[in-house]
Amino acid sequence: MKVALVGATGKAGSRVLNELVNRGHQVTGIVRHPENVPKLVGVTAIGTDRSREFLAGAIKGHDAVVSSVRFIELESEVIVAAVKDSGVKRYVVVGGAGSLLHADGTEEIQSFPEPFKPNLLKGTELLELLKKSGALDWTFISPSRLFRPGERTGAFRYGKDHLLIDEEGNSKISFEDFALALVDELEQPKYVRQRFTVGY
């Protein structure tokens, strides 16, 4: 596939880029600093001001678009409108854990320190906006509570709207395994117009 990856140099985005390249896909990395995109076979870098018009033009002509940027750095309305304007239907989001539910019905965001909440709230805002969008074949993938560098094991669980917690009370996923799950979803869609989560 030809994939437009918005935020190709971030912690999660760089792993998604590697996973896509390793599977033979062509990637257009849409970033603010294109010089930071790895010079890999099949990868093109485009610098952007993250405006609706520019993003739509950069995304146009691809088979799918993946966004992996901090929610507070790119307004939900802007990226969703840009994807719609581009004519690309398939849109996959590196989502947040904040809107995942606990067994008692409370949201995970309540467990996070205050400095993290503005970004998580924006992530929830994007998810709600996508749920109202009938024009896109979107998927919102939420990581577990701890989202950190690690190994690509392929040994993780899938969930829907509830936080995945292991027998020891931990909730975590590596960037590498998250990227694996994301590209699997791109190649063989199972959660179109849905949110899902992955964790150990």
Image: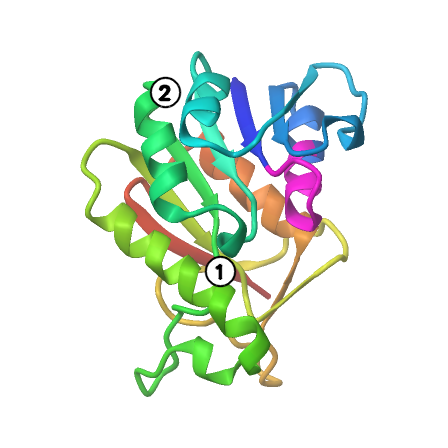
Residue 115 numbered mark, or none: none
Which residue is drawn at the image coordinates 64% and 50% (left, top)?
Answer: 177
Q: Is residue 176 above or below residue 163?
A: above
* Residue 190 visible in the snapshot: no
Q: Quadrant of the C terminus?
A: bottom right
The region drawn magenta spans 7-17
Q: CA distance from mark 2 to mark 1?
A: 24 Å
Give residue 57's quadrant in the image. Answer: top left
Q: Is residue 30 above or below residue 163?
A: above
Foreground: disc 2 or disc 1? 2
Q: Amino acid at mark 1?
A: Gly
How crowded pointer 2 is (Cα within 10 Å; few <14, some 14-19, many 20+) is rated as many
Identify residue for label 1: 96
Q: Is residue 20 above or below residue 16?
A: above
Which residue is drawn at the image coordinates 69% and 14% (left, top)?
Answer: 42
For numbered disc 1, what is the local secondary structure? loop
Give residue 160's quadrant in the image. Answer: bottom left
**Could you tell me what secondary structure mostly forms the magenta stretch?**
helix
Q: Amino acid at mark 2?
A: Ser
Which residue is drawn at the image coordinates 64% and 38% (left, top)?
Answer: 16
How crowded pointer 1 is (Cα within 10 Å; few <14, some 14-19, many 20+) is rated as many
* Residue 36 visible in the snapshot: yes
Q: Nearer the viewer, residue 63 or 83?
A: 83
The answer to whether residue 13 is magenta is yes
Residue 86 numbered mark, or none: 2
Q: Is residue 107 left or right of residue 38?
A: left
The answer to whether residue 171 is magenta is no
In the rendered image, residue 38, in percent from the top left (x then y), is placed at 80, 28
